[in-house]
Amino acid sequence: MNKQVNLIIFIVLVFFTKHLYSQDFFTNAELIATFLKEERTEGYVKTNWKRTFNKPRWNRIEASINFEHSLGLWQLIGGLENFYIIDNEILNIYETKPWLGGQITLRIVSVILFRQQIKGEVRAFFVDGDNNQNEVKWRTRFQSSLEILLSKNLYRQNQWFCNLEAEWYVVDDQYTLERYAPISDYRIGVGYKFPNSNIISIGYEFGNFSDSFESSRNKGNSISLLYKF
């Protein structure tokens, strides 16, 4: 009996080891600073650093500016995002991406907020040292999310909350030098809102990537840390 149990445990460990080996692991740190906050309009700048734990050594640094304008249940959203990708196996890539979209926000019950978002992006890629690889691509993104307050008192200035998000990407023609081109992302996180409205959160993300980049794994796991003020 013990031999059978040990064999089952061994098979399970081999399966999960092989399964995890076929995936990439990331850390993701994000800082958001609000520079405009009016009754219906908000503007903020964002910096982000995402990197792999395992090989290949891959880093992505982001600097962006974004806006949101409220039209009641609907919000008009847009911005300009810039990325510099450092990859030790291929040439480094700079991407600039203006985007525009719409979002609807609904309070389902007192403690649950639902958001549905659609974005259209124009992505311009510039490769260090090889102008022949520069390209412009289009992409559409769909995101659904739930924000769940974990406190029964909705009027407290400080709140714990939980976020659940799913996002899907639609691309007509994938850029072949993009190592981690997302197809879908699924995120869960927990955060704390301070009395001054600053937010800190930590989360986990599971992502599916396009297989257009042959030497890259097509699944990824990320641990994220965010601070917004």
Image: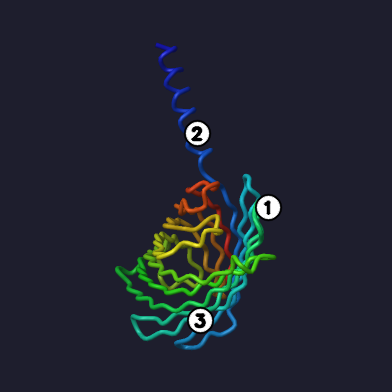
Distance between mark 2 and mark 3 Cα atoms = 43 Å
Identify the residue under disc 2. 18
Residue 73, relative to residue 12: is it above or below? below
Which is more N-terminal, label 3 or label 1?
A: 3
Q: Position of residue 148 (x, y in %)?
A: 39, 63
Asked whether residue 78 appears in the rendered view, the answer is yes
Q: Tell me where residue 142 appears, x and y as whole percent.
A: 38, 67
- The quarter of the rendered structure image containing the N terminus is top left
Q: Mark 2 or mark 1, which is nearer to you?
A: 1
Q: Is mark 1 on a helix, strand or loop?
A: loop
Q: Which of 81 and 189 is in front in this view?
A: 81
Looking at the image, the residue that sits furthest to the bottom is 39
Task: Identify the element where label 2 is drawn.
Answer: helix
Q: Residue at x 61, y 69 (%)?
A: 126
Q: Given the image, on which type of amino acid does mark 2 rest?
A: Lys
Q: In which quarter of the image is the C terminus?
A: bottom right
Q: Sequence-wise, which precedes: disc 2 or disc 3?
A: 2
Question: Residue at left 40%, top 65%?
Answer: 172
- The answer to whether residue 135 is above or below residue 214 is below
Q: Name the residue under label 3.
A: 67
Looking at the picture, which amino acid does disc 1 mark? Asn
Find disc 1 in the rendering and name its residue: 88
Query: Which of the two discs, 1 and 3, sits closer to the camera?
Result: 1
Q: Is 173 positioned to the left or the right of 59 in the image?
A: left
- Mark 3 crowdedness (10 Å alpha carbons): few <14, some 14-19, many ≥20: some
Q: In the visual, does 36 lie left or right of 88?
A: left
